[in-house]
Amino acid sequence: MGKLSLFIWFVLLLSTVGFASGIGANWGTQATHALNPEIVARMLRENGFQKVKLFDADDGALRALGRTGIEVMVGIPNDMLATLATSPEAAKKWVSKNVSTHISTNSVNIRYVAVGNEPFLETYNGSFLQSTFPALQNVQSALVRAGLSNQVRVTVPLNADVYESLTGVPSGGDFRADIKQNMIQIVKLLSDSGSPFTVNIYPFISLYTDANFPVEYAFFDGNASPLTDGSTTYYNMFDANYDTLVWALQKNGFGNMPIIVGEIGWPTDGDRNANLGLAQRFNQGFMSHIGDGKGTPMRSGPIDAYLFSLIDEDSKSIQPGNFERHWGIFMYDGEPKYSLNLGSTNSGLVSARGVQHLEKKWCILKPSAKLEDAQIAPSASYACAQADCTALGYGTSCGILEARGNISYAFNSYYQIHNQLDVACDFSGLATVTKTDPSVGTCKFNVMIQPYYGSAWNWRHGYLQGPFGLALGFALFMLTSY
Ligand SMILES: *[C@@H]1O[C@H](CO)[C@@H](O)[C@H](O)[C@H]1NC(C)=O
Ligand SMILES: *[C@@H]1O[C@H](CO)[C@@H](O)[C@H](O)[C@H]1NC(C)=O
Ligand SMILES: *[C@@H]1O[C@H](CO)[C@@H](O)[C@H](O)[C@H]1NC(C)=O
């Protein structure tokens, strides 16, 4: 390392010490065109993020975070839990390759290892119920053996329904009865190793799944009818939910355990309650709420949190809902979606620098094409299945489109995701390329960014097949759909 870079690193390190808690961001990479990690690392710094949470231990991301001083939480995906649970040797290798090496050779400031991601979600049907604890145990032992257990802590990011309140108020909080033994095992290990409890809290999901959820209670501006719990009054869902966890921990003998809010945020599209205005209201409200450092009624002091999320991810599963691809405070190309004051910079969000877009051209339904054409419907649904149509539908940013606009939107999404290859704008001759932006009002027809070839991400998702693969895929689809 040169003298200058050593100096810069030192300055960065110093500048983070004073604000040890600060705000963090979740950096997920389930995108057809993930940004270059170097660009993302700079974007994190320029926006004043002091912490980042990853969902795996991608080599490119970790290299880019080296010497930035940013605190890193690396993640172990759920599909690795079974292996790590049964093999201490696999855990040792994981820690050696994905933690030790990055700390010693790249100066990555790794502070946490997240073992699994919401492994107890009910949609997983208990698949990870038995493997989470032994995997956590093996990873913790591997950290101890690597001499890292004082600087790197283990944790398990859990969804907030691992606890509940049978009385409907926070003081009734306890771990869910059906998984209580699993939870106690985990919490005891966290406590013994000086590790935090990590929970993801989502008022948006409560609103999405429960039509009767009081909307105002999701926000922080105090317009909701308050919830009374003994002598305590709750004005927002976040505080009540967080304190339900505090009560659950306290009741089981872990009243002092540190808590990390692993994910919190609001999506901007894909649902009638997902838009720029509400996302800004929620995220800015949250930042102001934690900005005073006072904490919640049950737990005073700073709140440690990671916003969900940094950037939109256009290939996330939409099984939970169409909003899944729109959690970013930044768009897919690193442009801020709305103004947000994160506390450390007064000027709002700063765009990612050095991002290259493809040419300004779009793929649309030919004006001469007839809506009655039998190939239109299957072509549009094929495009949507392969690409991203989550901005279409009731109450979304493109909800105002008529049928022709809908089809053009689908064609364009497919075309952009395939890097504007000519064969990706054909659809049996129904489509054509235009240089006139078809965007209308809130409905943006995107132009994709240049693919980033420096990592395995894009290849892994298989989006870079050549023209032949594309044409063949579509031909096979058309043949089999008749
Ligand atoms: C390190 O992490 C990566 C990314 O999550 C994973 O693919 C790889 O298997 C891990 N390495 C080891 C030795 O477990
Ligand atoms: C969970 O069970 C349901 C119903 O039995 C099934 O449809 C679903 O695919 C299962 N999910 C997983 C992740 O195993
Ligand atoms: C446009 O597409 C969305 C989502 O597929 C659908 O809900 C809507 O009805 C479509 N609108 C028209 C006019 O076809």
Image (cartoon, rainbow, N blue to C red):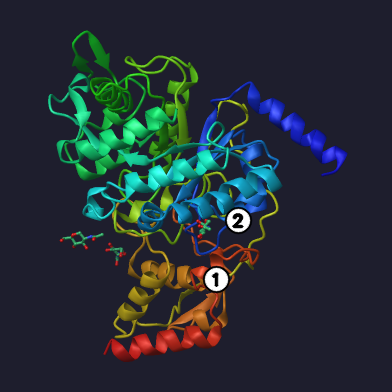
Q: Amino acid at mark 1?
A: Trp
Q: Is residue 40 visible?
A: no
Q: Which mark is residue 459?
A: 1
- Quadrant of the rendered structure where residue 350 is? top right
Q: Is 207 or 293 nearer to us in this picture?
A: 293
Q: Is mark 2 within 8 Å of ligand 1?
A: yes
| Helix, strand or loop under label 1 | helix
Residue 147 position within the rendered picture, expressed as x and y whole percent measured from the top left: 58, 38
Tag in front: 2 or 1: 2
Q: Is 218 or 231 nearer to us in this picture?
A: 231
Residue 157 position within the rendered picture, expressed as x and y whole percent measured from the top left: 38, 41
| Helix, strand or loop under label 2 | helix
Q: Which residue is mark 2?
A: 59
Q: In the picture shown, does residue 380 fall above or below 427?
A: above
- Quadrant of the rendered structure where residue 206 is? top left
* Disc on the earlier residue, 2 or 1: 2
Q: In the picture shown, does residue 16 fall above or below 391?
A: above
Q: Which mark is residue 395?
A: none
Q: Is residue 220 visible?
A: yes
Q: Are marks 2 and 1 in contact (CB under 8 Å)?
A: no
Q: Amino acid at mark 2?
A: Asp
- Quarter of the image containing the N terminus? top right
- Quadrant of the rendered structure where residue 263 is? top left
- Quarter of the image containing the C terminus? bottom left
Q: Give the residue at x 70% y 48%.
A: 105
Q: Is 266 or 253 nearer to us in this picture?
A: 253
In three-dimensional space, the C-alpha distance between marks 2 and 1, rounded to whole angstroms, equals: 15 Å
